[in-house]
Amino acid sequence: MAEIQIFIRKVLWKNDFLFPAVIWLLSRLLIWAAMLLVGPHLGSPPEGITPEFGWGVFDAWDSVHYRAIATSGYEFANDSEQHNLAFFPLFPLFIWGFMRLGLPFEVAGTLINNLAFFAALYCIYFWIEENYGRKEARWTTAVVAWCPLSMFGTVIYTEGLYLLLSTAALRAFDQKRYRWTILWGAMATATRPTGLALIPAFLLAAWRQRRPFIAYVAGFATAIGVLLFSLYCAIQFGDALGFLHAQRGWRPTLGFYWQGWLEMLLQITLGTSDWEFLGIKNYLHPLFFGIVVGYGYYLWRLGKHLSFPVVCGFYTLISFLLIFADDWFIYNLLNAVVVLGGGYMLWHLRTQLTPVTVMYGLCGISLLLASGGTISLARLAYGIVSLSIAFGVFLSRHPRHGYLSLGVFAILLPRLALKFAQELWVG
């Protein structure tokens, strides 16, 4: 038994080529098992469905819009309704290309996202290893692969493709390979709105590091992807900023949506989102929330002295949380932890990360906060790789807390995957 453990450690933790692949495969197997094996044998939940074994489990929510774009093209009438022009074109364009080869939409979209996510883990791993070291690369890759939101790297969403393109652009910039920065960056800005954060990130990092003029050119040229999309909007709909105007149909306002943030924080702490008529409906909710926060602080203070009973107590609390807490509490908690916690972690390690990593993370969070909504914030923030890098570097220096966090991820990951397969909202 000892020889097997030694062999596994040598293969997984010391082999640069195998580590990202194994981490990807193990996390995906957990997702596939929840969606394809467990889901079909459970009853239909309220407001959900009973998933059937097949490619269809990966096709829900935003996937519907990517299907419409890939098969029928964009539509846009006015900015008061929800139109698919709000979704950027590169991902559905790739799907359209795969469909021309004879693949059904579900197969094409799933393959593209999964393969891109697989490649993104390798890109992240080698980029982090080049700048920080092997240990930091292992932890960051594990965080990206096992984060509950990595489920969106398996279904028909843009997470995998965007992570690959944005990370490749950031890595190329760090390596001073500006032609590749332009190529990957332009493709990233054509994939999703948060790609726009790359442009100021490259410019600020170039100024911070006193890079040559070509670095500024590369930063501006990253906008080629979104400029081409703008040109299409001008020709097709007579509105060069149609893709921005279309966002209004999906969000309550533009700018910082403080009412939504207040409601979200109240729902997390007090169990109510009614901030105008503040009142606690269930006094067990704030009590339980206080216990979880207090226990988490206790675990942090223990540091290297974590014991098995203490860890078991923590996982028991997490299990009670998943069983008895409202789904919206879980999703709002993910929003707050990923956005606010990720932002704090990035600022805490700002002097230890490369300038472009920090600038991209700060620009990305600022863009999300100014987007005018709180829906899907955690998922969108997960696509900003700088936050995962900051968390991975931090956990590499606190491995006991790292293993504890990965355990929580392993509990939440199949839960979110199962909810998605049941067509319940997960962000």
Image (tube, grey):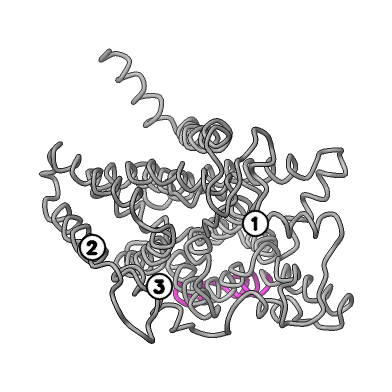
| Residue 334 in the figure: left or right of residue 154 | left
Pointer 2 with pointer 1, Cβ within 8 A: no
Compute the Cα span from label 3 to label 2.
Answer: 18 Å
Q: Quadrant of residue 176?
A: bottom right
Amino acid bearing label 3: Met
Query: The magenta stretch spans which residues?
Result: 206-221
Q: Nearer the viewer, residue 145 or 73?
A: 73
Instruction: Tell me, for residue 291, which label it has, or none.
Output: none
Q: Is residue 73 above or below residue 100?
A: below
User: Which residue position is annotated with label 2?
Assistant: 284
User: Quarter of the image holding residue 407?
Assistant: top left
Is 220 a magenta residue? yes
Q: State the quadrant of the N terminus.
A: top left
Of residue 122 and residue 293, the one placed in the foreground of this image is: 293
* Magenta stretch secondary structure, dominant: helix
Camera-nearest residue between 86 and 320 = 320
Task: Return the x and y of residue 83 as percentages of the image width and height.
Answer: 75, 71
Residue designated by label 3: 264
The image position of residue 121, as x and y in percent, is 52, 44
Q: Nearer the viewer, mark 3 or mark 2?
A: 2
Residue at point 55%, 61% (across, down): 173
Query: Within 10 Å of the Cα at label 3, are there few (<14), some (14-19), or many (20+) other Cα atoms?
Result: many
Kindly identify the amino acid type of the residue bearing the numbered disc 2. Leu
User: Which residue is located at x 45 percent, y 33 percent?
Assistant: 19
Q: Which residue is mark 1?
A: 61
Quadrant of res 231: bottom right
